Image: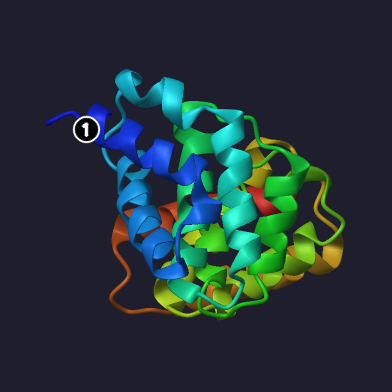
Amino acid sequence: MKLKTDALQSLKDKLLNWQQLSEQELEAYIREFEKIPRAEVSTFYTPVLSDNELGAILVAIGRQFPDNTKLQVNVVSALGNMVWRYGLTPTDVMFDFLVAASSNRKVNFYVALHIRVFPQYQTWSRKWEYLMSVPEIAPRKKAFVVFYDTVKQQLEKHDIMPLEVKLVIIKKIQAQLEDEDLHPYLKDDYLATLHAIVEK
């Protein structure tokens, strides 16, 4: 893996002065920036990718251009990977940005993928309501994987699921079990998860 520390520092410097850049320039720089925290993890990137000022600037850029879907997707993805892989402090401002971005149906899949790594997700009043909506997000096959992984995460955290949430989860997993092409490993995993939900 070729390190991109110089390129990363250069992108950071550009983003720190984002107000002097056009929307098109920002879209291009953020597209390049987002690839780095998503790629293979390197401790050499940690000083930049855990920088709270940079995290706040990404949110500011995202808020400035709410209708630019490509930019929104890349900001959400960058923030999620920076929090998850590089220890960026997950602020309430970042979390609120992800919640707002979820209203854009072209961005919502990326929100679903990353919002669960934020500790604020655990105390969010709409946590279950949002989780129940995830399997309906396009692309649905990938969205179900995110939904299922989030359900397992919540079980591991010993989160108390309301009965109506359990029933919806059980129904959605049972629907997957009806797939004739389901891999035996996945079938066993789904059955184990169903058992864990019922036992809870």
User: Residue 26: x and y, percent?
Assistant: 43, 59
Residue visible at 37% across and 50% down?
A: 34
Residue 60 visible in the shown view: yes
In the picture, which quadrant includes the N terminus? top left
User: Above or below — where is 163 with respect to 85?
Assistant: below
Left or right of 130? Residue 86 is: left
Q: Which quadrant of the structure image shows residue 168?
A: bottom right
Q: Is 78 in front, or is 65? A: 65
Q: Which quadrant of the structure image shows residue 139?
A: bottom left
Residue visible at 57% across and 61% down?
A: 111
Residue visible at 65% across and 62% down?
A: 63
Label 1 secondary element? loop
User: Residue 153: x and y, percent?
Assistant: 60, 44
Q: Which residue is denoted by mark 1 in the rendering? A: 4
Q: Is 1 in front, or is 144? A: 1
Left or right of 125? Residue 79 is: left
